[in-house]
Amino acid sequence: MVLPIGLFSIYYALLCYHLYDVVKNFCKYIDETTINDYGVILKQYLSIRKLVLEADSELSLLMFTSSLYYACAMYFGISSILHSEDYTSSGSYLGLVTIWLVFIASNTAFVVMAIFGSIVCEISTDVWEKAEELMNTEKNPTFSQKRFLAVSEKGFTMTAWKITPVKRSFILATLGTIFTYCILLDNIMN
């Protein structure tokens, strides 16, 4: 189970970085272009937004289920730290070390996935700021410019099962919540 989840983490991080790179290049294109046809820019932005939303639609359930896996790995890791004597009763530390390695690898993979998921949201905000900056330089913005600003203001994010957007706050909030529930469950079990 560790290998498929680990591979998904790598795939998710690479995909999010690729989406980040596409949007970053779009921002550079907006800066460098002399085209004043914001209808063309809007169409390009909408196609990028559609790409991100389709990727999120396909991966959001997997992101959620992998988060559940990471929660289980954290529970076993916390349990092994709090009750290490239960895992070394036969005199061997191999089981304990294995659980700790899975605990560290799982949490690292989750944090990496969440960081790369959050950069998609952050670059989306950069596009909106760029659009707002372009609007402020115009005395009489056209309808296309106003529409581009309105559409880019909505932004786009990767999500976990279409429930919660993956932003920077998602990382600490999720890890903190899972950690708290792990301690709570451990106290209830004992």
Image (cartoon, helix red, strand yellow):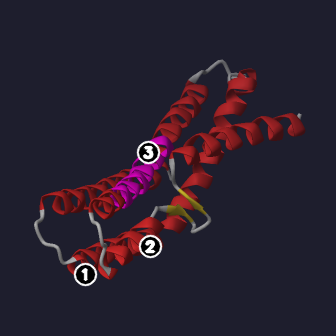
Q: Nearer the viewer, residue 168 or 99?
A: 168
Judge from the rendering whether residue 159 lies leftward or rightward of residue 137; answer left or right: right
* Residue holding disc 2: 58
Give, as a three-letter code, the residue at label 3. Answer: Ile
Identified at 55% across, 26% down, the residue is: 97
Q: Nearer the viewer, residue 128 or 56?
A: 128
Q: Position of residue 35 (x, y in %)?
A: 13, 72
Give the magenta range. 110-129
Q: Position of residue 169 (x, y in %)?
A: 57, 45
Between marks 3 and 1 in the image, the one whose residue lies nearer the viewer:
1
Mark earlier in primary sequence (3, 2): 2
* Residue holding disc 3: 115
Give, as a three-letter code, the residue at label 1. Answer: Gly
Between marks 3 and 2 in the image, the one whose residue lies nearer the viewer:
3
For mark 3, does the 10 Å Cα neighbourhood hold few (<14), some (14 to 19), or many (20 or more) residues?
many
Give, as a three-letter code, the residue at label 2. Answer: Glu
Mark earlier in primary sequence (3, 1): 1
Task: Quadrant for the C terminus, please.
Answer: top right
Image quadrant of residue 103? top right
Q: Nearer the viewer, residue 38 or 172?
A: 38
* Residue holding disc 1: 39
Q: CA distance from mark 1 to mark 2?
A: 29 Å
Image quadrant of residue 73? top right
